[in-house]
Image (cartoon, coloured by chain):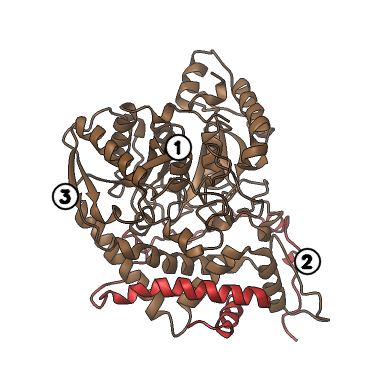
Chain colours: A brown, B red
Amino acid sequence: MHLNELTAHELLNLLKQKKTSAEAISQAIFSRIEKADKKIKAFVRVHKDTNKDNKEIPSSSLPIPIAIKDNLCIKDMETTCCSKILEGFRPPYDATVIKKLKESGAVIIGQTNMDEFAFGSSTENSCYGPTHNPWNLDCVPGGSSGGSAASVAAHETIWALGSDTGGSIRQPASFCGVVGVKPTYGRVSRYGLIAFASSLDQIGPLTKDVTDAALLLKIIAGHDANDSTSVNVPVPDYTKSLINDCQGLKIGIPKEFFIEGLDNEVKDAIAAAIEVLKKKGALIKEISLPHTEYSVATYYIVATAEASSNLARYTGVQYGLRRQPAAKRKTSLVDMYEETRGEGFGSEAKRRIMLGTYALSSGYYDAYYLRGQKVRTLIKNDFDKAFNEVDAILTPTSPTTAFGIGEKANNPLSMYLSDVYTISVNLAGLPALSLPCGFSKTEMPIGLQIITKPFAEEMMFRLAYTYEQNTAWHKQKVSL
Amino acid sequence: MITPKDVQYIAGLARIHLNDAETEHFTKDLEAILGYIGKLQKLDVSKMEPTSHALPLKNVYRKDEIKPSLSQEEALRIAVAKQNGSFKVPQVIE
């Protein structure tokens, strides 16, 4: 087995026993990237020299290679959200999670591909072109953290960070057969995460197994004075939740998630997963989340409205791209804005900005944005009510396995509807984890989602670990 | 019913220049998406409070004390255009 195929916890053991070195691990990783990434295109920038900057590595160091989604600010490293409008942008500061990783001795090996500004569910909206699913190169890796998910699945990195606003960590994790976690809103600082929707965004781990996810979340979580939406709640040692037992735990299965549009193979895999947990003592109960059918519509008002506001800063005034219309003799500031944004943003970005602008505009604000926020309350209340009866909610992560590259490109609405199982979780601010629970007949990964109460990541990890330790999906490797 | 004129108006608010082909394309897209979003009109939200944030955090303040921040030089290092310690832009006032 090559070093790059191991998990972080396995490598840490080897390092402790002095059976390997940080250099050997990095070398295995870069060698793999060179061989495989021409086909997968998970990385937009590879950094072979970053570990040379780490002057003082503490003894509690975790010198494990990590890949970072291209929307996290790394000081002086070009960070573009895979958008032309941020071409050449070099952040003058590190995101808090990057600072924490550097302090832990992490080796930042590269930045990964994503849908531009996290607008997408397939990583096809990147200005650099799509990433390919390592299980089938003609399929999407999911999105928007597709590069991060693919790099972990292909063993081009040991672990990775992504961001999740409507499912952008969990859905690619599901499509690529890896573990993905969206923490409770406020659990991880968003300082330095280039914002999409400020009330929904969270940064989280993409890893090869549940143990690694617990380890990585422990490093990045915590209150931050620079993010006033981060919560001052102590970070537990999530590795202590890795218990292979769920005796007496109540798991809710929402009936509204098992309707037309759910692939039969996915449905069967979830049913089998439920049996595994039942055998380990879980009590299964059917629950109802009655406003599920309104979640995609709510999200595409609320999230796009917030996005239109957050992306208003990209004007060509300060950083990144600046364009002036060629035809005019004398250009005004507004012409510069319009030309820069017209050329700098891809079509999905424009679509979402315009949707959001419309929803917030005079005459439509009440009917769209305000109404959307009220429906958000209904959705949140559904979950609060459900958590009075159960400890966790179990669902498929996605209605299907990874679709083909180009398959949904001309139908934005169909693309949006593929987020139906993950989206309401962000609206309610809850923690959720996706892990592999099977493969389709065409050998594409299927993902299982576990949702728990705010700040109940320990429960989420315990259930996920129990399921994982009683199955072997996470041990299957891509043939590429 | 969204018209190309509506799309041009919204693009204007959003400060995005669209060519004719884009305007036509986005008219179709927005029509379809807004049509789908219309299902929210079915719900009775008369007694609901809006949720702008999932967490019950309010008024997170810090003391009004000056702390270290980015220097002007650091902030301008990657500026598109700069002059006299400022970002340089096209003329604003006629």
Residue placed most toward the observer, B84 or A98: A98
Q: Is the residue marked by circle 2 packed among few (<14), some (14-19), or many (20+) residues within 10 Å? A: few
Q: Residue furthest right?
A: A329
**Dividing the image into 4 quarters, which one contains the C terminus of chain A?**
top right
Q: Nearer the viewer, mark 1 or mark 3?
A: 1
Q: Tell me which corner region of the image, top left, top right, bottom left or bottom right, holds residue B11.
A: bottom right
Q: Nearer the viewer, mark 2 or mark 1?
A: 1
How many numbered marks appear? Answer: 3
Q: Which residue is mark 3?
A: A389
| Left or right, A303 with reference to A261 | right
Q: Which residue is mark 1?
A: A177
**Three-letter residue code for mark 1:** Gly
Q: Is the residue marked by circle 1 packed among few (<14), some (14-19), or many (20+) residues within 10 Å? A: many
Whether residue A220 is visible here, answered yes or no, is no
**Three-letter residue code for mark 2:** Asn
Q: Where B38 sits versus A76, above or below?
A: below
Pinpoint residue A35: horizontal percent, then vertical percent.
Answer: 67, 30
Q: Which residue is mark 2?
A: B84
**Three-letter residue code for mark 3:** Glu
**Residue drawn at the location 69% of the way across and 61% of the way down:** A319
Q: Chain of mark 2?
A: B
Q: Chain of mark 3?
A: A
Per the model, the C-alpha gap separating discs 1 and 3 is 30 Å
User: Residues at marks 1 and 3, common chain?
Assistant: yes
Q: Is the residue marked by circle 3 packed among few (<14), some (14-19), or many (20+) residues within 10 Å? A: few
Q: Nearer the viewer, mark 2 or mark 3?
A: 3
Q: Where A140 sits versus A118, above or below?
A: above
Q: Where A190 sits versus B94, above or below?
A: above
